[in-house]
Structure formats: structure tokens, C-alpha cells
Image (tube, grey):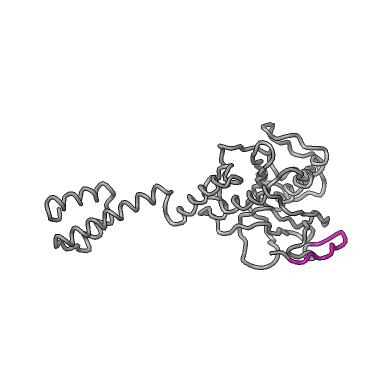
């Protein structure tokens, strides 16, 4: 939902001075301008969000939710998974999982600062989906037993050498904020999957965060699991079993065979092979075995 933009307050700013729809985030009381998402990013946000939201373990997920664990911080990751009450106002607890989409023109220094602030506030994973060049996901994970925010900057934690480009000077400066809060980043590419134990039940294929077909496949799997099925094959198997049970009941009615509660329970417990064998027996012998 969009609201008329309010005039930007003077720095330092607190989160309660901003309202939903204002094109800003806050970093230590400093306004950070947030511009509209481009076509590629908007498409990816939508399909990635539905994959995360439908995971059987997820109770709530959101898009562009303002996270404000303290007055001088307001960050709005593209996607978040966590305890998100259906209430107005900013979220005061950091989500366990946040996803950012980065395309051409990304302010790398600000992105690195945002990652650090989210991890320092309690987020366990930040996935950065890179849409330009070779599509990939950078996984930033909170360090085990990370200390609370320290006001004294230190050297940034190194990135994994694998496929992670060196940071520009401005980005290195931003990464000096509380570097102890994260482990070295790793990079996942198409064909790999991402996990968030305790947050997501299913691993997320990298492609499902940006490719519509892959996202729909993962979403279908998730929705079926929410209904008690392992996948589409399980639904097909159940359909065949239901068809065989109906055929057996029709035969019993034609043959005048009463189906007692015990026989009904036996029918419900039979697998496809047993139901097929029972149907053939009834057709051949015209009596219950």
C-alpha cells in the first residue's frame, strides 16, 4: 500500500518519524533513500516470496516490512520470514531469514551495511540474490555466539573466495560495522539449494528465487505438503487408490455384498496393489475373500 510521501525529517532520525510508504530506511539515524524496484527485480521478488511463504514450516512471511529493533534503525528487506503479526506498525524483532535482490546499479556499500545491521539485530541468514551477470545467491550467516553490537568498528570479515567479487572501497568501509556478527559469505549457483534449518522445512533451489517455472514447481510442492502429500506423485497415487475403492464398492453393491465397518476399514487400509487384487477377486468369484 502506498501513502503520500511525507517531507524527510532532519537527521538524526528515529523510526517513529517515518511512516509506511516513505521511501527511506534508517541506518544509525541516517536516512537511506529507497527507490522503486525494476522490472527484473519485481518479477523475482514475487516468485521468490511465494516459495518462502508456502513452505510448510513458515507461519508468516512478508515483503518490504520495516524492521526497527531500535529507534535509530529501520530496514526493509525485500522478503522476510519470521514471526510477523498481522498488525500495523514496524516489526520490532529481526526476522530469522531475510532476502535482498540486487541488480545493476545496486549501492554495494549500503547493501553491506544493511546486511551487517540485520545480522547484528538477530537475523540468522541474509540471502542476497544477484540478478545481473551469472545469477547466484550470496549466503550471509550470523556467526555462532555473535557478540552484541560494538560501537568500535573493526576490519570486515572476509568473503569466500568462491565467486564472490572483491568489495569496492566504499563497500569495505561499510562492512567495517560490527564485522564479528557474520561468517564469511558463501555463494550458491543454479543447481544448488539453500537451507535455513528451523525456519524452512524444505531446501530452496537457487533458481526458485528468480525463475518463474522453478518457483512454481517449488510452490506446488510446498502447498501439497501443507495438505499432507509428499508431492504430485503422492496425489496421483491417492487418486488411483480412491478410484479402486469406488470400483470395489460398486461391485459389492451389484453383487449384494454388505460392507461392514470392518470391511470398510480394511478397504481404507489397502494399497493400490491390494485393491486391484480385491477387485479382480470380486469379479471372478463374486464373493468377499
Place residue 246 in its image quadrant. bottom left
Residue name at image x 66 percent, y 41 percent: 138
Q: Is residue 127 left or right of residue 237?
A: right
- Callout count: 0
Classify the position of the N terminus by image quarter.
Answer: bottom right
Q: Which residues are magenta?
A: 3-14
Q: Quadrant of residue 29?
A: bottom right
Of residues 94 and 53, the one nearer the viewer is: 53
- Residue at image position (24%, 51%) is 275
Front-most of 146 and 83?
Answer: 83
Image spot of residue 178 (x, y percent): 77, 46
Give the residue displayed 79% in from the left and 41% down from the top: 171
| Drawn side of residue 225 relative to residue 126, left or right | left
Residue 89 appears at what percent x and percent y? Answer: 70, 66
Pick the residue in front: 130 or 139: 130
* Percent coordinates x, y for residue 214 in the rendering: 54, 45
Magenta-drawn stretch, dominant element (helix, strand or loop): loop
Residue projecting furthest to the top: 161
Amino acid at each position: 500500500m502506498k501513502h503520500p510521501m511525507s517531507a524527510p525529517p532532519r537527521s538524526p532520525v528515529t523510526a517513529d518519524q517515518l511512516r509506511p510508504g516513505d521511501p527511506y530506511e534508517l541506518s544509525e539515524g541516517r536516512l537511506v533513500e529507497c527507490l522503486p524496484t525494476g522490472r527484473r527485480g519485481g518479477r523475482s521478488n514475487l516468485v521468490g516470496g511465494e516459495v518462502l511463504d508456502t513452505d510448510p514450516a513458515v507461519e508468516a512471511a512478508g515483503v518490504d516490512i520495516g524492521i526497527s529493533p531500535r529507534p535509530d534503525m529501520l530496514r526493509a528487506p525485500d522478503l522476510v520470514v519470521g514471526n510477523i503479526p498481522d498488525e500495523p506498525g514496524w516489526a520490532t524483532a529481526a526476522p530469522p531469514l531475510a532476502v535482498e535482490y540486487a541488480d545493476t546499479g545496486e549501492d554495494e556499500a549500503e547493501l553491506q551495511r544493511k546486511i551487517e545491521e540485520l545480522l547484528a539485530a538477530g537475523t540468522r541468514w541474509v540471502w542476497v540474490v544477484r540478478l545481473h551477470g551469472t545469477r547466484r545467491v550470496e549466503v550471509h550467516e550470523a556467526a555462532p555466539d555473535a557478540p552484541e553490537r560494538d560501537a568500535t568498528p573493526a576490519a570486515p570479515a572476509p568473503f569466500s573466495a568462491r565467486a564472490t567479487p572483491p568489495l569496492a572501497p566504499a563497500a569495505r568501509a561499510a562492512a567495517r560495522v560490527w564485522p564479528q556478527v557474520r561468517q564469511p559469505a558463501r555463494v550458491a549457483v543454479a543447481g544448488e539449494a539453500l537451507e535455513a534449518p528451523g525456519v524452512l522445512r524444505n531446501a530452496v533451489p537457487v533458481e526458485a528465487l528468480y525463475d518463474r517455472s522453478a518457483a512454481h514447481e517449488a510452490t506446488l510442492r510446498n502447498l501439497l505438503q501443507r495438505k499432507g502429500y509428499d508431492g504430485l506423485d503422492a496425489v496421483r497415487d491417492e487418486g488411483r487408490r480412491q478410484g479402486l475403492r469406488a470400483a470395489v464398492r460398486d461391485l459389492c453393491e451389484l453383487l449384494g455384498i454388505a460392507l461392514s465397518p470392518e470391511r470398510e476399514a480394511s478397504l481404507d487400509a489397502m494399497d493400490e496393489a491390494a485393491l486391484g487384487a480385491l477387485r479382480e477377486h470380486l469379479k471372478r468369484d463374486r464373493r468377499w475373500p
